[in-house]
Amino acid sequence: MEALFGSEYEELRESVRALTEKKIAPFAHDVDEQARYPQEASEALKQAGLFAAHVPSQYSGDGADSLATVIIIEEIARVCGSSSLIPAVNKLGSVPLLLAGSEAQKQKYLPLLVKGAGFSYCLSESGAGSDAAAMTTKAVRDGDGWVISGSKKWISNAGESEFYTVLASTDPTLGAKGITAFIVEKSDAGVSFGAHEKKMGFRGSPTREVYFDSVRISDDRRLGEVGTGFALAMKTLDHTRITIAAQALGIAQGAFEFANKYAHERQQFGKPIFDFQGIQFMLADMAMNIAAARSLTYAAAVKSERGEEDLTFFSAASKCFATDVAMKVTTDAVQILGGYGYVSDFPVERMMRDAKLTQIYEGTNQVQRIVIARHLEDL
């Protein structure tokens, strides 16, 4: 790390790790068991300037670059996947604003985000997941403003966030080219939320449907030009899929560390189970794949910061590879712990459940492979 990127990134990792060990890790089990929002983590991240560290300094943020943001999310996910969704979702929700927002919009919303407002991203719908262009949520012109009607599904931190980037169809006859992005506030009349989804993992991060019942907003809430929303959504994902790779990387690292420690302490047949070659090979593969995933994820983060032409390939590849690694590593960690790995007294079963979602959201890994195949010429 220090040789490749400079000592400041390793120093950042050390400081974030110290914070997570003290103020986030002690609550991770309870957050998962109670399926409650990780309020302790939220407060700790706000106080440390990590709630939305990616926000540029001119808008009261820390100005963390893409690699620094990846390291922050990775270290939080190492101890608590649900808590890592706080900075990850805040970046996802606000990147469209950073990419296409006016200066007035940035000055209004970004400082509030840094202070703890929260910013979620509303793209998916009940009938529009991987096929995002099939959305039915509509925004209709109404004088100088818009009326938004419809609903969005699987929205992370819905109800907790104050602000929402909402993609809506402004001209259904144009398909993807008839989609526009808007900023909707939680306090807007007509905004409501569905019940909390009962999920396999990431139980501490609320996932809810968001309903828009004739929500009237002014045109100054529109992000970018009319009809450019879908392109903006895809460009956003090019930058934010890397944060999912970081999240998966952290989960895998946490599971590996726990399994490795357990293997050196657990005695069977008169010796630590680490002395058995079968266990050694499992741990060696885990460490090797995590290292490979980290290299790919960090490379993608650098490309994101520079806006390089092959970003789409590297973003999809890092997300796909790192999340597949996380699923394999956490599954093997459970196996190494045996029966203890299958009960909630130990964190690896939680990490395994959390890892599964990283293969699904922000584009399934099957979709990532399609994206990768379409950008092979970028290599």
Image: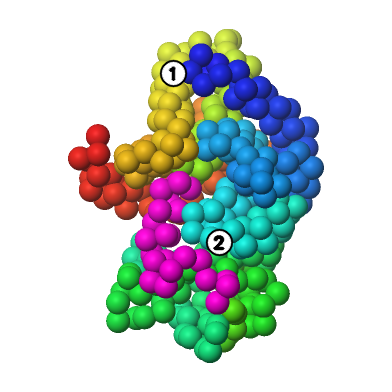
Pick the residue in front: 88 or 194.
Answer: 88
Q: Is residue 132 left or right of residue 111?
A: left
Residue drawn 58% across the image and 33% down it: 68
Q: Is residue 32 magenta?
A: no
**Residue 7, quarter of picture:** top right
In percent of width and height, residue 311 lies at 36, 41
Q: Inspect the image, locate mark 2, and give the three-letter code of the amino acid beneath it.
A: Ser
- Of the residues shown, which amino acid type is indicated by label 1? Ala
Instruction: Give whichever of discs 1 and 2 has the lower sequence position.
Output: 2
Q: Which residues are magenta?
A: 219-241
- For the residue labelled by badge 1, is the local secondary structure a helix, a strand or a loop? helix
Quarter of image, res 215: bottom right
- Please indicate whether residue 318 sits to the left or right of residue 86 in the image: left
Pick whichever, 20 or 198, lies toward us: 20
Query: Are the residues at dot 1 and dot 2 in contact (C-beta closer than 8 Å)?
Result: no
Residue 226 lies in the magenta-colored region: yes
Residue 336 in the image: state x and y as whole percent: 51, 27
- The circle drawn on residue 284 is 1
Disc 2 secondary structure class = loop
Instruction: Residue under label 2, please give it.
Output: 102
Which is more toward the observer, 231 or 317? 231
Q: Quadrant of residue 20?
A: top right
Tell which of 91 and 31 is nearer to you.
Answer: 91
